[in-house]
Image (tube, rainbow, N blue to C red):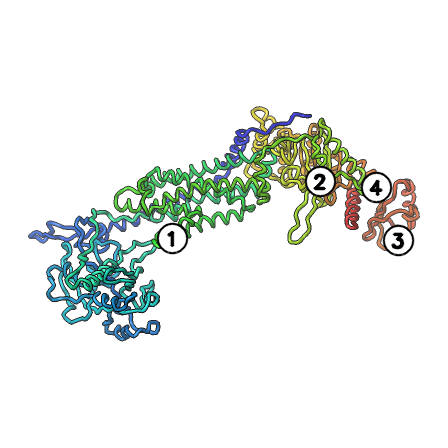
């Protein structure tokens, strides 16, 4: 038995695949330029916008307010002083405030025109009539409920203590803390300045009953800030409701809404089981005043005073009017002077950087799907490439591409001054981006298992990129900042790689924004312990998902038919079992199926089956290919019966022989070839290539096998020479032998001269691509070659040249060839098999088949249509048993058995007939292989129809 080449080593195959990928990358200059230019464009755009914003923020209206406090004799300012007392709300942020002012604690009071009144939707008798809105005299209401009505009403009656003229009005903080005041202005997001005191708006004094002297204007100094307060008395009333559900319904109808107001209340109190021994309450307040959106600062709600009011009322009711719990003031923390900066890159980094990073995902996805759609992965597999090197090199290729891309992006962003990259800890950025790009690569491998069309994969890939970014910015962002949204659901949403990437960028952006605004650092390792920091959870989720998706991608790739969809989920576990090469002498294969030859089976087919049985029992059998009762059944779908594609095929093919398979479309030839090259698994039976079982040893068979598929499976941007170098390396050719094999292959298919081998395949004609496919199938001296219509698309000269190549190639190897060209079959094939309806109808060399099935001459005569009867009389006189096989518009064909007629008699009869009627043309030919094929195929179809 000939020595069998072992598969190339892992490193050899990895080297071949890496070189091929590098060649492809060099040809994709436009794509690479677009990928690199996109992040540069985004970064430059952010820098330009940032400079525009910085120039705007440097204007005086955003700097701490200043005033001249001392002037000279000439009126010129000698000393200017800056501070919060000279600043507007926009300017306060940039001022140094070592001693923040103390502000009285307020409650949120509805505006006069929106205070709750009696309406159709709120028909409560204790609500005032709507006419009070015209005079702006409506009271401000509080809703009350509880288990003990009388106790709750007693306490709520003291919510708004009456103003006493004996109060020390020189100490306004003390005086105001003993009464209840409020404002209808929107609160601010810090307590450095309260908008209620820094504007000319009214301060409401809530009283059980208003008297005229309570509404007045007073002067007030808050931390050196002189203020004029417009005090207006408002009647505060508490209204009893029977249950919390009634209050919920009433508040829902009346809370402040975006785009307008309705009937508002100050608050609601549920006293629950409050007694003189304990206070337990629930407080309703209007949270929409905090203006909590994803793109604005959250305002500080005026809630503390609501709690203090009810606490004071309870103490006074239990212990007497002398007991008080005062909330004297609220104030912010001291702050240093800062320049107002709006870091656009940090604020928008989540959206734009999500798009930039995910831009590589559709590139990797389409790369993987392209090789699957064009069956290039199949071709590489059939030429000996194993799954391990393919996955490893593809992963490494994507990883290096991602690392270079991200490194360039980060360095460029840092160089142009984006604070996102400058203030955050470099180690955290490295870990995050490292895990991120690995997760993205694994996700691309995983998703590639579900696509077989590049166009669909491209659309879905880019839709995922832009969709995940937009959903993250306009949906997920709100969930992150919503304190009441369940954290568990946030973690569930972060399982989506796009959302986990967005969340990580969000955290880095928020820390960078605050660090830039305060002049400090961004996120550090210590910040990972912050309760609101989700980076630690993100890193854990992304790392676990990276590993799981990689395993799932490997699993789905292993259980799918090569390049197709998922087929057999148990195949992976079978692949993990120890493989061994069975002996041809094992009885398990010789006795797989009963070898009963029914009477209807053709003698030559039955003889081939007996030869196969003998060879299987002979351990020294030196056959290139042995097929033992090979069957393939496709399960029926949608109620259709099972399709029997190959019906127990047996075939023995020695080295040095070319076997041709002829058959109509749908006969099962493709199914047979697919089983032999490992694309599909046999339903039963098996086959051996040089003693190696196709069910168990396909990896070894691939190394000793060559395939020329029906359609050219080639990379459009690689040259012919690069194709041959790649596949030759897969066959473990190296050094001078590699170069010689490639040059010889190019010469053999006439692609060497004129630089044709150095041209990209996209510039080849159909014939040149076909010749390259034949050269690929023969590179590396394979022992068995499968050629599916190898001369399709070739001109006559190229076809004859190709036939010479195949004749030369079959000297030291076995070739199985399928074709529809009878001329090609006669020229190339030592034996032929006519394959119809999943089984051989006959076997033999072309001469034997023509002698066996052709034993007749074909007599053709063309006359005018009205003389067809004369022709038929002529033939019947010549040979009564002649069979008419064709008749159309005066042209008739007859089959004349060779044993019953002489050629001289035919010539003589035609010459006599010419004197009686006009014969336009006539001919007498021997049976062709095409006639044999048609006759056998029709006979088999008739037999199957009858059966």
* Number of the label disc, if any, that sits on residue 925: 4
The disc, 3 or 4, on the residue closer to the chain's N-terminal end is 3
Real-space CA distance between mark 2 and mark 4, rounded to the nearest whole angstrom: 24 Å
* Dot 2 and dot 4 residues touching (CB under 8 Å): no
Q: Secondary structure at mark 1?
A: loop
| Residue 920 in sight | no
Please tell me which residue is depicted at 16% across the width and 71% down the height of the picture.
211
Between label 2 and label 1, give the one nearer the viewer: 1
Nearer-N-terminus badge (2/1): 1
502 or 740, nearer to the observer: 502
Asked if 212 appears above or below 710 in the picture, the reply is below
Q: Is residue 783 above or below residue 885?
A: above
Q: CA distance from mark 2 to mark 1?
A: 66 Å
Q: Which of these two is toward me, 658 or 634?
A: 634
- For residue 869, which numbered disc appears in the image? 3
Residue of label 1: 486
Which of the image's four quarters has the N terminus? Answer: top right
Mark 3 surroundings: few (<14), some (14-19) or many (≥20) residues within 10 A: few
Inter-mark Cα distance, 3 to 4: 22 Å
Please tell me whether residue 850 is drawn above or below residue 12 in the rendered image: below
Badge 3 element? helix
- Measured as percent of width and height from the top left, residue 510 is found at 32, 47
Distance of label 3 from label 2 (alpha carbons): 39 Å
C-alpha distance separating marks 4 and 1:
88 Å
Please tell me whether mark 4 sits on a helix, a strand or a loop: strand
Q: On residue 819, which mark appears? A: 2
């Amino acid at each position: 038995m000939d020595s069998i080449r072992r598969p190339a080593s892992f490193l050899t195959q990895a080297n071949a695949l890496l070189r091929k990928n590098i060649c492809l990358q060099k040809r994709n200059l436009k794509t690479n330029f677009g990928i690199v230019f996109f992040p540069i464009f985004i970064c430059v755009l952010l820098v330009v916008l940032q400079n525009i914003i910085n120039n705007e923020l440097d204007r005086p209206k955003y700097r701490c307010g200043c005033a001249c406090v001392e002037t000279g004799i000439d009126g010129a300012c000698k000393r200017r002083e800056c501070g919060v007392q000279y600043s507007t709300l926009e300017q306060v942020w940039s001022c140094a405030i070592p001693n923040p002012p103390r502000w009285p604690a307020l409650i949120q009071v509805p505006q006069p025109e929106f205070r709750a009144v009696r309406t159709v939707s709120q028909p409560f008798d204790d609500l005032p009539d709507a006419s009070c809105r015209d005079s702006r005299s409506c009271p401000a209401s509080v809703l009350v409920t509880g288990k003990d009505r009388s106790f709750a009403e007693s306490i709520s009656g003291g919510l708004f203590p009456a103003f006493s003229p004996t109060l020390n009005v020189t100490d306004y903080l003390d005086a105001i803390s003993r009464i209840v005041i409020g404002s209808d202005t929107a609160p601010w997001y810090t307590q450095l300045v309260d908008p209620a005191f820094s504007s000319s708006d009214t301060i409401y004094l809530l009283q059980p009953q208003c008297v005229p002297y309570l509404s007045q204007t007073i002067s007030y100094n808050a931390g050196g800030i002189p203020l004029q307060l417009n005090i207006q008395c408002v009647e505060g009333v508490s209204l009893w409701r029977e249950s919390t559900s009634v209050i919920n319904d009433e508040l829902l109808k009346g809370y402040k809404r975006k785009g307008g107001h309705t009937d508002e209340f100050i608050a609601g109190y549920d006293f629950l089981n409050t007694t003189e021994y304990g206070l337990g309450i629930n407080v309703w307040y209007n949270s929409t005043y905090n203006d909590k959106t994803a793109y604005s600062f959250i305002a500080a709600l005026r809630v503390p005073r609501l709690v203090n009011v009810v606490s004071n009322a309870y103490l006074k009711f239990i212990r007497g009017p002398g007991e008080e719990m005062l909330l004297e003031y609220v104030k912010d923390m001291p702050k240093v002077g800062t320049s107002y900066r709006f870091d656009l890159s940090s604020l928008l980094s989540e959206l734009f950087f999500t798009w930039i990073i995910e831009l590589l995902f559709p590139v990797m996805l389409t790369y993987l799907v392209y090789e699957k759609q064009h069956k290039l992965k199949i071709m590489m597999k059939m030429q000996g490439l194993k799954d391990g090197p393919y996955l490893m090199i593809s992963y490494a290729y994507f990883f290096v591409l991602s690392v270079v891309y991200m490194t360039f992006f980060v360095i460029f962003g840092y160089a142009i001054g984006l604070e996102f990259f400058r203030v955050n800890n470099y180690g955290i950025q490295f870990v995050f981006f490292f895990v991120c790009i690995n997760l993205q690569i694994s996700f691309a491998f995983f998703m590639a298992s579900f696509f077989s069309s590049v166009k669909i994969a491209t659309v879905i890939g880019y839709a995922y990129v832009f969709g995940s970014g937009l959903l993250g910015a306009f949906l997920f962002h709100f969930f992150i900042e919503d304190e009441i949204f369940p954290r568990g659901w946030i973690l569930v949403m972060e399982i989506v790689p796009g959302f986990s990437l967005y969340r990580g960028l969000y955290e880095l952006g928020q820390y960078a924004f605050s660090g830039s605004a305060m002049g400090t650092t961004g996120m550090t390792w210590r910040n990972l312990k912050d309760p609101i920091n989700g980076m630690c959870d993100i890193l854990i989720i992304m790392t676990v998902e990276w590993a799981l998706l990689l395993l799932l991608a490997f699993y789905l790739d292993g259980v799918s038919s090569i390049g197709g969809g998922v087929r057999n989920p148990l195949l992976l576990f079978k692949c993990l079992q120890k493989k061994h090469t069975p002996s041809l002498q094992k009885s398990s294969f010789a006795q797989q199926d009963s070898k009963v030859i029914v009477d209807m089976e053709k003698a030559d087919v039955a003889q081939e089956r007996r030869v196969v049985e003998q060879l299987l029992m002979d351990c020294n059998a030196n056959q290139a290919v042995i097929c033992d009762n090979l069957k393939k059944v496709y399960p029926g779908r949608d109620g259709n019966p099972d399709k029997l594609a190959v019906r127990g095929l047996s075939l023995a093919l020695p080295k040095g022989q070319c076997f041709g398979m002829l058959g109509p479309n749908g006969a099962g030839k493709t199914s047979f070839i697919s089983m032999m090259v490992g694309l599909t698994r046999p339903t039963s039976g098996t086959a051996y290539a040089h003693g190696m079982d196709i069910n168990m040893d396909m990896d070894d068979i691939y190394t000793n096998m060559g395939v020329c598929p029906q359609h050219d499976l080639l990379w459009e941007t690689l040259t012919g020479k690069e194709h041959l170098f790649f596949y030759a390396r897969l066959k473990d050719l190296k050094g001078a032998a590699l170069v010689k094999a490639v040059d010889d292959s190019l010469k053999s298919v006439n692609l060497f001269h004129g630089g044709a081998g150095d041209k990209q395949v996209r510039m080849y004609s159909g014939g040149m691509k076909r010749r390259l496919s034949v050269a690929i199938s023969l590179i590396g001296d394979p022992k068995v070659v499968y050629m599916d219509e190898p001369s399709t698309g070739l001109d006559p000269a190229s076809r004859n040249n190709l036939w010479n190549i195949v004749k030369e190639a079959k000297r030291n190897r076995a070739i199985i060839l399928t074709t529809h060209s009878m001329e090609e079959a006669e020229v190339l094939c030592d034996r032929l098999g006519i394959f119809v309806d999943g089984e051989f109808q006959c076997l033999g060399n072309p001469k034997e088949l023509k002698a066996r099935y052709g034993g007749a001459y074909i007599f053709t005569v063309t006359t005018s249509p009205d003389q067809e009867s004369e022709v038929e009389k002529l033939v019947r006189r010549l040979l009564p048993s002649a069979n008419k096989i064709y008749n159309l518009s005066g042209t008739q064909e007859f089959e004349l058995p060779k044993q019953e007629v002489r050629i001289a008699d035919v010539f003589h009869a035609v010459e006599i007939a010419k004197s009686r009627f006009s014969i336009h043309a006539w001919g007498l030919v021997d049976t062709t292989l095409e006639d044999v094929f048609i006759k056998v195929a029709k006979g088999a179809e008739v037999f199957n129809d009858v059966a």
